[in-house]
Image (spheres, helix red, strand yellow):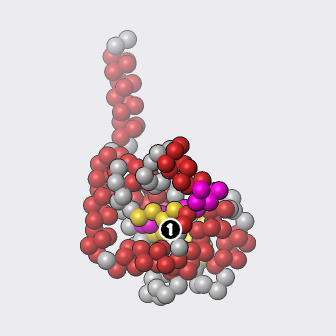
């Protein structure tokens, strides 16, 4: 709920002036629907539940809260920006980034690629102005989008083909059976 309270209003505000696009929120059933409704009231933005993958298949760009959703969005080849507000505020962010985790990025695509393939707006950087500018780039800057899609192709190579884990497991079982 905290993630939605902190990030969704920024996303909604950034989407406001882009009337040539239809914006949709991939809702989560475990969150009270009234929370979404209060934030989205009067915006024309719809909530769709239990259809995240179908939404990603048809999305042109996305604003995503950090987590596995960023990796899924990348693997669906949807240009994105990541928004994340750290519990405890900017001080917690500094401590975690510099002293505890010592990582440069929060999103899985950036961590896996070991580069800033997608823009992350964490804590103080998560402003309407910053997110609005990035959303414009995601929607209208074809060169920028293509660079991100190239990074996604590299990510897919690193992650392996769909079913790779199952094929590896089957091969291991085959070898184990041969050695009995």
Q: Is residue 45 above or below residue 102?
A: below
Mark 1 is surrounded, within 10 Å at the Cα level, by few (under 14), some (14 to 19) or many (20 or more) other residues, namely some
Q: Is residue 7 left or right of residue 167?
A: right
- Residue located at (64% from left, 86% from top): 42
Q: Quadrant of residue 84?
A: bottom right
Q: Secondary structure at mark 1?
A: helix
Q: Is residue 104 left or right of residue 39?
A: left
Q: Is residue 24 visible?
A: no
Q: Residue 4's x, y, as percent?
A: 63, 66
Q: Residue 56's x, y, as percent?
A: 45, 65
- Residue located at (37% from left, 26% from top): 172
Query: Front-most of 146 and 90?
Result: 90
Q: Residue 124's x, y, as percent?
A: 54, 66
Query: Front-most of 60 and 104?
Result: 104
- Residue located at (35% from left, 49% from top): 114
Q: Quadrant of the C terminus?
A: top left
Q: Is residue 34 left or right of residue 142?
A: right
Q: Residue 129's x, y, as percent?
A: 49, 78
Query: Front-most of 96 and 40?
Result: 96
- Residue located at (53% from left, 73% from top): 127
Instruction: Count how many numbered circles sit on residues in the image.
Output: 1
Q: Is residue 157 visible?
A: yes
Give the extent of the magenta segment: 80-91
Q: Quadrant of the N terminus?
A: bottom right
Q: Is residue 29 left or right of residue 151?
A: right
Q: Is residue 83 above or below residue 163?
A: below
Residue 140 is inside the magenta segment? no
Residue, far top: 180
Residue tagged by mark 1?
125
Q: Quadrant of residue 34?
A: bottom right
């Amino acid at each position: 709920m905290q993630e939605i309270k902190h990030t969704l209003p920024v996303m909604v505000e950034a989407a406001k002036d882009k009337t040539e696009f239809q914006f949709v929120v991939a809702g989560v059933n475990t969150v009270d629907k009234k929370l979404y409704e209060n934030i989205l009231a009067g915006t024309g933005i719809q909530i769709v539940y239990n259809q995240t993958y179908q939404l990603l298949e048809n999305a042109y760009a996305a604003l995503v809260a950090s987590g596995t959703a960023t990796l899924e969005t990348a693997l669906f080849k949807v240009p994105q920006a990541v928004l994340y507000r750290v519990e405890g505020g900017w001080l917690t962010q500094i401590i975690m980034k510099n002293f505890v985790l010592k990582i440069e990025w929060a999103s899985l695509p950036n961590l896996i690629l070991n580069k800033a393939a997608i823009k992350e707006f964490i804590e103080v950087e998560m402003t309407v102005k910053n997110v609005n500018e990035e959303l414009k780039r995601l929607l209208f800057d074809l060169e920028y989008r293509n660079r991100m899609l190239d990074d996604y192709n590299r990510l897919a190579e690193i992650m392996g083909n769909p079913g790779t884990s199952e094929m590896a497991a089957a091969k291991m079982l085959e070898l184990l059976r041969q050695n009995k």
